[in-house]
Image (cartoon, grey):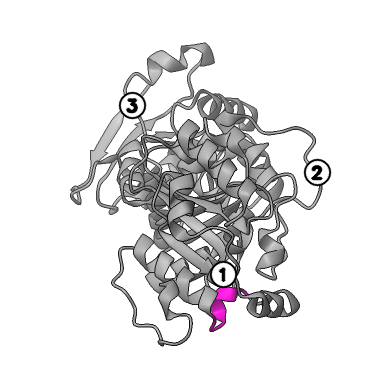
């Protein structure tokens, strides 16, 4: 088995190692030429496929980031080879062909092949594919995770306004920060994020969680709907799910979302069953949504004392539908019941809520006391300085 290594100059990041398998020398050389000139790429050429696929772990003791497979020489052998590498997680698999055959491309993509090239390969196309491959490397993923932030909206009980606050917070965060922002609707089985934002979604979180073996940045992007504000949304399904997803699938979704977005906003409704998942890891900021009512304050007290005693600033209490003139308890009593200071008080603005329901326009895009508080929440979350708001009757809510 021939082994030819071509090392390109680095670019300050870890080298991307590519194993190029192709019995046909002409096609293999053409693909090698398309890889040449891309900095930070090391190419190893192999003139034959392994005779025994059970021996793959030994063959891949030398770690490769990408395996490029010639799909033409022996399609069945190439297919089995690509599928085995993908299933074992040994490397990211790509394939190439000299014929533009859509059926062949689909077959290989279903086997786990991430990119499928037709010779001759455009340099820009190859560059984009290599960039996507590099972002999937553990080092690159770790760097992205360190920079990303997760914001979880959890309700003390149903009807506290979790979805309204989470949706409008996410829209405002995307606009105020100008950073990539994803809103995930985990209020299953009846999540309302898409309806709240006046959107329709072709795919849902079900597609991500029930096909988690395929879940990566590219697959996630294909499932998202995009709001006019620039916010990406992974909506809840329109139908009831056949079976609830496992924690492992949810954990993978969180990891992939963090790798691909600067900010991830999770609407989990009142689902305390998710507390054992990566959603509630220590890096997440949890907004506990409650109301100034007996049952809501009681539930909040129980949740805080049971699950969030050790959380510091990354647990923030949001008192929704706050109207001092109708309170049964004063602020001191509320904070005593919660055992925590209330960070945010969202006013009870029935007229604004009705307007947004009638127009399917998010509250965040309207000028109201509620949107003012949500804007302050989003800017604080993004570590942006306070934005001067128009002072008026509701200015004390800030």
Q: CA distance from mark 3 to mark 2?
A: 43 Å
Q: Residue at x 55, y 59 (%)?
A: 166
Residue 212 spot, x, y in % from top left: 60, 36
Please determine whether, in this image, residue 278 is positioned above or below residue 374. above
Residue 393 spot, x, y in % from top left: 48, 85
Residue 40 magenta-drawn? no
Q: CA distance from mark 1 to mark 2?
A: 36 Å
Residue topped by disc 3: 63
Which quadrant does the C terminus fall into?
bottom left
For the record, the magenta segment spans 362-368
In front: 264, or 71? 264
Quarter of image, res 366: bottom right
Which label number is shown at residue 323?
1
In front: 189, or 48? 189
Residue topped by disc 2: 240
User: Regarding mark 2 in the picture, which secondary structure is present there?
Assistant: loop
Q: Residue at x 51, y 63 (%)?
A: 170
Ranked by sequence position, the earlier of labels 3 and 2 is 3
Residue 319 spot, x, y in % from top left: 52, 59
Q: Residue at x 55, y 79 (%)?
A: 365
Ranked by sequence position, the earlier of labels 1 and 2 is 2
Visible residue check, residue 98? no
Question: Does the residue at mark 3 contact the one at mark 2 (Cβ under 8 Å)?
Answer: no
- Relative placement, left or right, of 333 versus 76 is left
């Amino acid at each position: 088995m021939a082994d030819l290594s071509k090392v390109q100059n680095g670019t300050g990041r870890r080298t991307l190692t590519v194993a190029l398998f192709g019995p046909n020398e002409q096609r293999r050389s053409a693909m090698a030429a398309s890889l040449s000139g891309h900095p930070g790429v090391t190419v190893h050429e192999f003139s034959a496929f392994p005779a025994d696929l059970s021996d793959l772990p030994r063959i891949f003791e030398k770690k490769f980031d990408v395996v490029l497979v010639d799909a033409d020489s022996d399609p069945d052998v190439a297919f089995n080879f690509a599928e085995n590498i993908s299933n074992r997680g040994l490397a990211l698999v790509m394939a190439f062909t000299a014929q533009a055959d859509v059926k062949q491309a689909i077959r290989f993509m279903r086997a786990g092949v991430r990119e499928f090239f037709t010779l001759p390969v455009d340099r820009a196309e190859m560059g984009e594919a290599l960039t996507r491959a590099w972002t999937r490397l553990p080092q690159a993923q770790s760097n992205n995770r360190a920079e990303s932030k997760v914001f979880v909206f959890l309700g003390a009980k149903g009807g506290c306004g979790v979805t309204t606050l989470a949706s409008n917070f996410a829209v405002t965060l995307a606009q105020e920060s100008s950073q990539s922002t994803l809103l995930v609707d985990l209020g299953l089985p009846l999540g309302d994020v898409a309806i709240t934002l006046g959107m329709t979604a072709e795919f849902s979180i079900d597609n991500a969680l029930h096909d988690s073996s395929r879940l990566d940045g590219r697959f996630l992007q294909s499932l998202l709907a995009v709001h006019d504000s620039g916010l990406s949304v992974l909506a809840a399904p329109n139908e009831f799910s056949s079976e609830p997803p496992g924690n492992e699938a949810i954990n993978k979704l969180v990891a992939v979302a963090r790798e691909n977005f600067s900010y991830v906003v999770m609407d989990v409704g009142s689902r305390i069953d998710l507390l054992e998942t990566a959603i509630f890891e220590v890096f997440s900021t949890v907004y506990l949504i409650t109301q100034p009512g007996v049952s809501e304050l009681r539930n909040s007290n129980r949740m805080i004392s049971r699950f969030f005693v050790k959380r510091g600033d990354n647990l923030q209490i949001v008192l929704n539908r706050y109207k001092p003139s109708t309170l049964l308890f004063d602020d001191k009593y509320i904070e005593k019941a919660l055992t925590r200071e209330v960070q945010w008080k969202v006013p009870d603005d029935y007229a604004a809520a009705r307007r947004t329901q009638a127009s399917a326009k998010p509250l965040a895009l309207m000028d109201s006391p509620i949107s003012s508080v949500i804007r302050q929440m989003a800017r604080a979350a993004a570590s942006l300085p306070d934005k001067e708001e128009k002072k008026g009757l509701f200015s004390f809510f800030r």
